[in-house]
Image (tube, rainbow, N blue to C red):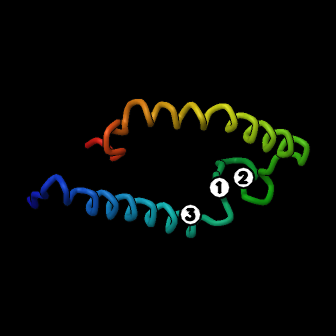
């Protein structure tokens, strides 16, 4: 087993995350355009599983308005619990 120092742990974590993402991308490439394969029905694909245009329009507006409320509070929580007051660096 390989041991890493605390400072060197970020690279293996990034490499593991990248590997998982590449596995998922390869799997989706094999399945494309089918998203969900059903037994006795028409498969759900990227082309026949979309919502009506008006639904996507309202969903887009809801996401924009919701982010106006959520993102400032997320920044406040990050400032309150994650950042040091003196030197503005991330705590470990």
Packing grade of label 2 (10 A; few <14, some 14-19, many >=20) is some
Q: Which of marks 2 and 3 is nearer the N terminus?
A: 3
Assign a secondary structure to mark 2. strand
Packing grade of label 1 (10 A; few <14, some 14-19, many >=20) is some
Along the line of sight, which residue is nearer the eye, 69 or 2? 69
Q: Earlier in the sequence, mark 1 or mark 2?
A: 1
Name the residue that disc number 1 marks: 35
Mark 2 vs mark 3: in front: 3
Where is residue 34 drawn, in percent x and y? 67, 60
Q: Are marks 3 and 1 in contact (CB under 8 Å)?
A: no
Along the line of sight, which residue is nearer the eye, 33 or 7? 7
Where is residue 85 drawn, in percent x and y? 35, 36
* Cα distance in 3D space between marks 3 and 1: 8 Å
**Residue in the image at 45% along x and 36% along y:** 78
Assign a secondary structure to mark 1. strand
**Residue in the image at 32% along x and 45% along y:** 87
Name the residue that disc number 3 marks: 28
* Cα distance in 3D space between marks 2 and 3: 13 Å
Left or right of 21 on screen, residue 31: right
Left or right of 89 on screen, residue 42: right
Where is residue 18 drawn, in percent x and y? 40, 63
Where is residue 38 drawn, in percent x and y? 66, 49
Relative height, residue 24 to residue 41 (above, below): below
Q: Which of marks 3 and 1 is nearer the N terminus?
A: 3
Name the residue that disc number 2 marks: 44
Quarter of the image with the N terminus in it? bottom left
Q: Are marks 1 and 2 in contact (CB under 8 Å)?
A: yes
**Residue in the image at 50% along x and 68% along y:** 26
């Amino acid at each position: 087993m390989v041991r890493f120092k605390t400072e060197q742990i970020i690279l293996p974590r990034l490499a593991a995350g990248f590997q998982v993402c590449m596995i998922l991308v390869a799997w989706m490439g094999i399945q494309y355009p089918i998203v969900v394969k059903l037994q006795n029905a028409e498969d759900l694909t990227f082309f026949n599983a979309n919502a009506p245009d008006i639904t996507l329009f309202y969903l887009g507006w809801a996401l924009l308005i919701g982010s106006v409320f959520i993102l400032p509070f997320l920044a406040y929580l990050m400032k309150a619990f994650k950042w040091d007051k003196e030197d503005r660096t991330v705590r470990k």
